[in-house]
Image: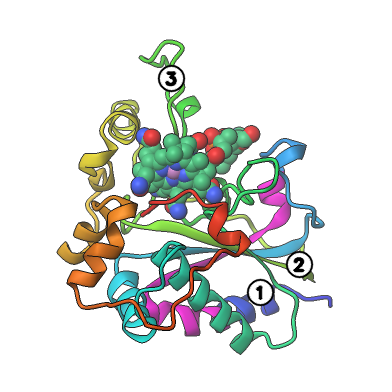
Amino acid sequence: MAASTANVEGITGLLNECLSKVGFEVYPLKVGWYNSVLPPTLRLAYPDNSLAVVLLSTPAMFEQAFLPFMEEKGCQVMSDPIDQCVKHSVSSAVSQCFPGQEVDVRYDYEMLPSRKPKFLAQTAAHVSGAAFYYQQSDVRDQPWAEKKMFGVCVHPRFGGWFAIRALLVFGGVTIDSEMVQPLPPDCVPSRESKIELLEAFNFHWQDWSYRDIVRPVQIYSQKQKDYFSTLPAERFALLQTWGFLPRESDQPDLTSDAQSQVAGHG
Ligand code: B12
């Protein structure tokens, strides 16, 4: 199916209608923008002009999607409850907005058999213009000698109070070559503030100070902070104290996607 920029707006508009009210944001990108910064082993096997959409969760997702999801489903043991909720929200939106259409949905926690992530969430967020990806290489005269520093994305409105949840690839939708790549806002511009950001993310990410590197318009609620600062293995117990009890009929979910996760990303 050929499409133009008008269809890109149509597709993101439909997704937005379903997903923004439950605390997600969507940003379109061209597969070529993503592939052009990556080595062949990490690229997506789609033509450069195919449409993809990156999905972020904002602070509101917890109250607008997660707690209602838990209310409805109860505690399903085994796979991560947040991941289950995101998957449920995305699958419902995709089947409602694009019935019968092939959409390749890749989640942040999914790994390939090679153990590489199914998509690089931060690279996708950056090239779509959603959130600047600050990397070690962005700092002149690095103070860290040979040490490897992990990079971090900063959202212009939510700082670090968000997560990158999925990439939806519309292999059959071709983007007009006129679509201009938006640059993400460089909200941590100085060398000193970039150093502060990368050090906070790498050396004391548990105190969450990296999330406040820009003044956020909204942060996680106390309940959400309590949830994410609880170890993944103890989150079921916490959910039970909130009244979400396991259902009698629950069977352990031993399907493939329960096995290949990096737990605990909030
Ligand atoms: C594996 C993983 C981890 C591992 C390893 C970390 C790492 N970065 O490798 C561990 C377990 C340590 C980890 C920890 C954490 N993680 Co983690 N993790 C991931 C995961 C699943 C994959 C990252 C990965 O392997 N990348 C591969 C490496 C090679 O990629 P890279 O370093 O970016 O290099 C590429 C780019 O440089 C690109 N490139 C080259 N040139 C250019 C130029 C441009 C302009 C661009 C854009 C790109 C680009 O090419 C390189 C590859 O060749 C992602 C989710 C995902 N699917 O992406 C989350 C993710 C990175 N983690 C995240 C978080 C929040 C955390 C934690 C804080 C945990 C938590 N509970 O919240 C901690 C803190 C990090 C720390 N200090 O240890 C968030 C980061 C959000 C953000 N704002 O950026 C992510 C995106 C998950 C999410 N759902 O949002 N994590």
Task: Return the residue nearer the eye: 42 or 189.
Answer: 42
> What's the amino acid at mark 1?
Val
User: In terms of image quadrants, where is residue 49?
Assistant: bottom right
Secondary structure of residue under mark 2: loop
Q: Does any portion of residue 134 appear in the rendered image? A: no
Task: Return the residue nearer the eye: 67 or 251.
Answer: 251
54 versus 5 height, above or below: above
Image point (75%, 76%), residue name: 102
Left-right relation of 207 to 262:
left
Image point (37%, 80%), residue name: 69
Image point (33%, 53%), residue name: 233
Please give the range of residues in magenta: 13-35
Q: Pick the quarter of the image with the N terminus.
A: bottom right
Secondary structure of residue under mark 1: helix
Q: Which residue is mark 2?
A: 176
Secondary structure of residue under mark 3: loop
Q: Which residue is mark 1?
A: 8
Which is closer to the viewer, label 2 or label 1?
1
Residue 204, image x and y in percent?
25, 33
Q: Pick the quarter of the image with the C terminus.
A: bottom left
